[in-house]
């Protein structure tokens, strides 16, 4: 064979021969299944369930998560994971990995709701009037599960995973306080999840772009002049004024909003009077408003105040409106980053199969995870926990709400896999801010 023939033959082998597989690509595709196998070990499952039940028995409201935070820190101590505390009053930030960039965060909310649990079981809430009725107890357990998985595989991490145990999601805007503390600077991406009683276990759902609406709250006191119900001409009736206000508020969506843009104004609170024959001096109403753009949220806020004060004046009443922005800041819309959506589909597809990754329509519910997304690329998704054999699960914020604890290993493995593969595969854009290290490690 001549030299020219040898060269030609080698060229053909290189052109059509097998292409070597990148070790990083192979490793990242194995991570989800390996992490899920780890999370499904019986000792890990028993531990996850035990942690979740401890938290469920001792629910705490926003910025009061003292015992929950103590439990989180104790578990991180057992794992040898360094953390920063306190952050945003009761929050905890754990750190797994190299302590060097890139940084990726995974988040769980810790707070409960002010409601009485009606589920009779061994681990029912021990605190009267407080309940984990939105699944945040399971969210904390799953993030601790992710911490255990990541710590076990810390030598494989190509950067640092920040574990965000956040207080006060339920209206308190705990995410905003975390950001205001400056502890998430130079984080390249953040992931969060929420359990769903409507999705089958082993399935997840999300979408690229707008997922959840922005929201705000309002409360108004409409004041008139009380008197006997039999002689209304001597009174100024705030109940009649409030009734007109409520009807007029419904026109903000039906007559003023673009029909192609989803908006909601709901009056859910009406308090006034205590007797059948007495016109009260004042009435208090309150509610929520929702939209998918900041401009629409601000427009609704302005018009709600105008409608309440001016409609009350028509009925000779005075009105004051409070949006409680200090305690309940306006939430932006939750908008998922399109690049992280692709990453999510790849990781979850490898773990659960592409047929179990569902695309969902936007919801008018809201999440303070959106504050993170205003500062960095973020991705939020829903984790299924419905099992037909267990019957229909009540919806979130119900006193009968239950968690299917079989979902805990899935959440732990998903959190850990999304973070670990992000560090391995995604090349973050250089930040314009000065680079920082997390020397807690």
Image (spheres, helix red, strand yellow):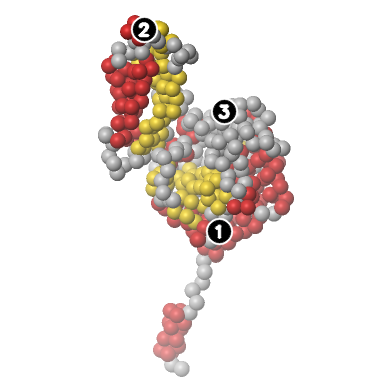
Task: Tell me the CA gap for discs 1 and 3.
Answer: 35 Å
Residue drawn at x 58%, y 34% is 399
**Does label 3 or label 2 sit earlier along the sequence?**
3
Residue drawn at x 49%, y 29% is 172
Q: Are marks 3 and 2 in contact (CB under 8 Å)?
A: no
Task: Tell me the CA gap for discs 3 and 2.
Answer: 40 Å
**Is 386 or 433 nearer to us in this picture?**
386
Which numbered dot is residue 135? none
According to the picture, the residue beneath numbered tag 1 turns out to be: 352
According to the picture, the residue beneath numbered tag 3 turns out to be: 114
Task: Decide: few, some or many residues near mark 3? Use Cα within 10 Å; few <14, some 14-19, many ≥20.
Answer: some
Could you tell me which secondary element the residue under label 1 belongs to? helix
Task: Tell me the CA gap for discs 1 and 2.
Answer: 69 Å
Residue 99, position as x, y percentages in the image: 57, 44
According to the picture, the residue beneath numbered tag 2 turns out to be: 231
Residue drawn at x 60%, y 59% is 33
Q: Quadrant of residue 51?
A: top right
Placement of 125 over or under 27, stated as above or below: above
**Does label 1 or label 3 sit earlier along the sequence?**
3
């Amino acid at each position: 064979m001549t030299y020219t023939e040898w060269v030609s033959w080698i060229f053909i082998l290189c052109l059509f021969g097998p292409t070597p597989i990148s070790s990083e690509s192979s490793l990242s595709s194995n991570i989800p299944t390996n992490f899920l196998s780890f999370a499904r070990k019986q000792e890990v499952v028993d531990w996850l369930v035990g942690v979740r039940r401890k938290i469920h028995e001792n629910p705490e409201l926003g910025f009061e998560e003292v015992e929950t935070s103590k439990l989180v820190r104790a578990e991180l101590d057992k794992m040898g994971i360094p953390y920063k505390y306190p952050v945003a009053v009761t929050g905890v930030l754990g750190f797994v990995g190299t302590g060097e960039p890139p940084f990726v965060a995974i988040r769980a909310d810790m707070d409960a709701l002010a409601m009485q649990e009606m589920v009779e079981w061994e681990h029912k809430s021990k605190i009267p009037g407080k309940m984990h009725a939105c699944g945040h107890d399971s969210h904390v357990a799953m993030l601790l599960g992710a911490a255990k998985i990541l710590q076990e595989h810390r030598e494989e991490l190509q950067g640092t995973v920040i574990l965000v145990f956040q207080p006060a999601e339920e209206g308190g805007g705990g995410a905003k306080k975390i950001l205001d503390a400056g502890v998430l600077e130079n984080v390249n991406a953040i992931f969060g999840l929420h359990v769903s009683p409507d999705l089958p276990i082993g399935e997840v759902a999300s979408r690229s772009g707008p997922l959840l609406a922005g929201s705000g709250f309002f409360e108004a006191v409409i004041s008139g002049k009380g008197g006997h119900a039999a002689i209304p001409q001597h009174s100024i009736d705030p109940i009649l004024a409030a009734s007109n206000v409520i009807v007029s508020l419904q026109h903000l969506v039906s007559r003023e909003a673009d029909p192609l843009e989803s908006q909601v104004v709901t009056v859910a609170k009406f308090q006034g009077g205590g007797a059948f024959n007495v016109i009260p001096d004042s009435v208090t109403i309150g509610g929520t408003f929702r939209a998918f753009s900041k401009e629409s949220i601000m427009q609704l806020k302005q018009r709600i105040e105008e409608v309440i004060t001016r409609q009350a004046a028509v009925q000779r009443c005075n009105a004051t409106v409070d949006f409680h922005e200090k305690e309940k800041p306006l939430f932006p819309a939750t908008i998922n980053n399109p690049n992280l959506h692709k990453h999510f589909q790849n990781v979850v597809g490898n773990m659960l199969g592409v047929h179990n990754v569902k695309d969902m329509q936007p919801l008018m519910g809201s999440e303070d995870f959106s504050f993170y997304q205003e500062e960095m690329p973020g991705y939020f998704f829903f984790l299924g926990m419905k099992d037909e054999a267990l019957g229909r699960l009540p919806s979130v914020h119900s006193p009968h709400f239950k968690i299917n604890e079989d979902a805990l290993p899935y959440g732990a493995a998903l959190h850990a896999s999304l973070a670990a593969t992000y560090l391995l595969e995604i090349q973050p854009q250089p930040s314009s801010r000065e680079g920082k290290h997390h020397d807690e490690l």
